[in-house]
Amino acid sequence: CRSVSRAIPMVSSPEDPNRDALNKATFHCLGPFFAKLTKFIEFTDKAISVFCAHVGTAAMAESGQTQTTAPRALYSALIKLVDALQKMDNLKDMKACVHNDFARYKRAWQSNPREVVGPEAQQAVFELTHTLQMFLTGELKHPKQFVVFKLRS
């Protein structure tokens, strides 16, 4: 993965007459990539909730609270799911280009929010950037391995 934002021209100075147009183009160019990342966050959240539900079912079966037993294939699938989530989380943490692109995306939006997205979409973009910020950089308690932190909590 190479940084997409490196291919986009930088604003040379605050007085640049093309500054607003360049920031708007940068924001819209990087937008589809972060839309994919948002879908990944939604997938991760859903996968974690499914994982927790199945672990609860397996735990109840093992403790004898239900009449059924958990099949070994369930345990195997849960292990594969955790492994896949961990690998995706590690990739997210290792790819500095994602963080660089996000910084550029956020900078382009913050330069002039009304010009970039219009007044009606500002709150939605703010919430999106906040969600992405928490996912990419994490909160103070878990700067790395966001998925593993969510699994533990």
Image: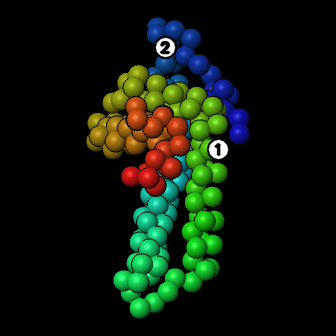
Left or right? Give the position of 74 relative to 55.
right
Q: Vertically, is 99 above or below 54?
A: above
Q: Quadrant of the N terminus?
A: top right
Measured from the top left, where is residue 30 in percent x and y? 55, 38
State the residue at coordinates (58%, 60%): 82
* Residue for badge 2: 17
Q: Vertically, is 89 above or below 16?
A: below
Instruction: Name the disc covering residue 119, or none.
Output: none
* Residue for badge 1: 91
Tell me if I can see residue 123 in this picture: yes
Left or right? Give the position of 76 relative to 25.
right
Which dot, 1 or 2, sits closer to the camera? 1
Of 146 and 6, nearer the camera is: 146
Tell me if I can see residue 57 in this picture: no
Measured from the top left, where is residue 46 in percent x and y? 45, 63
Q: Secondary structure at mark 1?
A: helix
Residues under labels 1 and 2: Cα distance?
38 Å
Q: Secondary structure at mark 2?
A: loop
For mark 1, does the 10 Å Cα neighbourhood hold few (<14), some (14 to 19), or many (20 or more) residues? Answer: few
Amino acid at dot 1: Leu
Amino acid at dot 2: Pro
State the residue at coordinates (46%, 8%): 15
Occupied quadrant, residue 126: top left
